[in-house]
Image (cartoon, grey):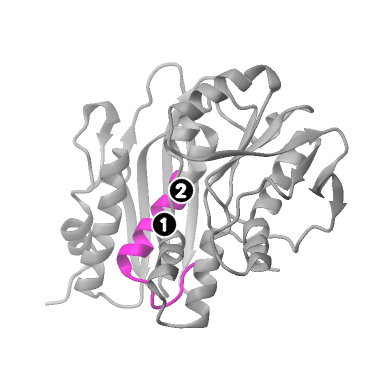
Amino acid sequence: MPLLEFDIIRKYFSDITTKDNSANIHVGIGDDAAIVSIPENKKLVVCTDTLNEGVHFPSHTSAYDIAYKALAVNLSDLAAMGAMPKWFTLNLSLPEVNKDWLADFSKGLQQLSRQYQLNLIGGDTTRGALSISITLAGHVDNSQALLRSGAKVGDKVYLSGCTGEAAYGLACLSASAVVSQTEQYFVSRLNQPTARVNLGLSLLGVANACIDISDGLVADVTHIAESSQCGIELDLNAIPLPAIADKEQALECALSGGDDYELAFTVALSMQAGLKQLIRQTDLPITCIGEVVATPGVQLLDNGRPVDLPRTGYEHFK
């Protein structure tokens, strides 16, 4: 007997919940809409992302990885705002109902949901080309959200982790259907990115501006520069590179490759002590890669000398 829409929801998605009273869910899955409340002195923060087969992930990507990434990229958006994630909705378009695929997809969602204490509170399923849309909501203290527009001249620019690893993972998959054990690490960075939620929360009151690296390092720090009406100078020799043999490819991936979901942020000189304390409390590498300046735009410097910027990061409809 074929599974109908409500059978799919009940069997694979109805138990993605923490049963946590602090989630403030008054009505969840099963009604026409969800009802939630946010704590006093908090602001609601909402983001959404869509992943389409052939655009955001190769057709042979596992259902587990698709679900994991679909939720992770939304978590990364809230991380960049310094927000605490709480609830999400799922819209799933499927070409056919495959029970094994749905079970694997559900496991991917559950993995991250449990890790971050998230609750699935609604959504929709329909027939069509494979597409996943997730809307994630959370909250942040009043007047505390991290924005792209807060950078100030004199701020230092920092980067968590390393950019370019996901782009190299995609290059490995594009070159061969079978990847080596070494290359598998980079593929995992593409398929199962780590959202820096805890770092984003820790940066509240420390950072002036923040963004997650989804479209490429240069492209995304340009968003900070434009939103803050300032410029950014990046130190070419300070930027962490993925550990691959071809250094030219490593640099290109680090500067213009997307899908890393690390955080780039700016910190005033007066807050450097607070940042150093934060760094001591985390095992995540955090690197100073540049400085905010008055001259508009983003400039790449090699030992103080300007060099040409690489091609810009990924853009839809280009």
The answer to whether residue 282 is left or right of residue 310 is left
- Judge the density around disc 2: few (<14), some (14-19), many (≥20) Cα neighbours within 10 Å: many
Q: Position of residue 316 (x, y in %)?
A: 64, 65
CB of mark 1 within 8 Å of CB of mark 2? yes
Q: Which residue is mark 1?
A: 70
Q: Nearer the viewer, residue 214 or 172?
A: 172
Q: Nearer the viewer, residue 81 or 207?
A: 207
Q: Quadrant of residue 70?
A: bottom left
Q: Position of residue 103 (x, y in %)?
A: 21, 65
**Residue located at (62% from left, 33% from top):** 147
Q: Does the magenta-highlighted stretch encompass residue 61?
A: yes
- Judge the density around disc 1: few (<14), some (14-19), many (≥20) Cα neighbours within 10 Å: many
In this orientation, does residue 24 appear?
Answer: no
Q: Quadrant of the C terminus?
A: bottom right
**Residue located at (32% from left, 35% from top):** 35
Secondary structure type for disc 1: helix
Q: Quadrant of residue 138?
A: top left
Q: Quadrant of the N terminus?
A: bottom left
- Note whether 70 is above or below 32 in the view shown: below
Q: Which residues are magenta?
A: 56-75
Q: Amino acid at mark 1?
A: Ala
**Residue located at (40% from left, 62% from top):** 188
Q: Nearer the viewer, residue 19 or 299?
A: 299
- Note whether 128 is above or below 293 in the view shown: below
Q: Which residue is mark 2?
A: 74
User: Of all residues shown, which one is farthest toward the left?
Assistant: 1
The answer to whether residue 11 is left or right of residue 188 is left
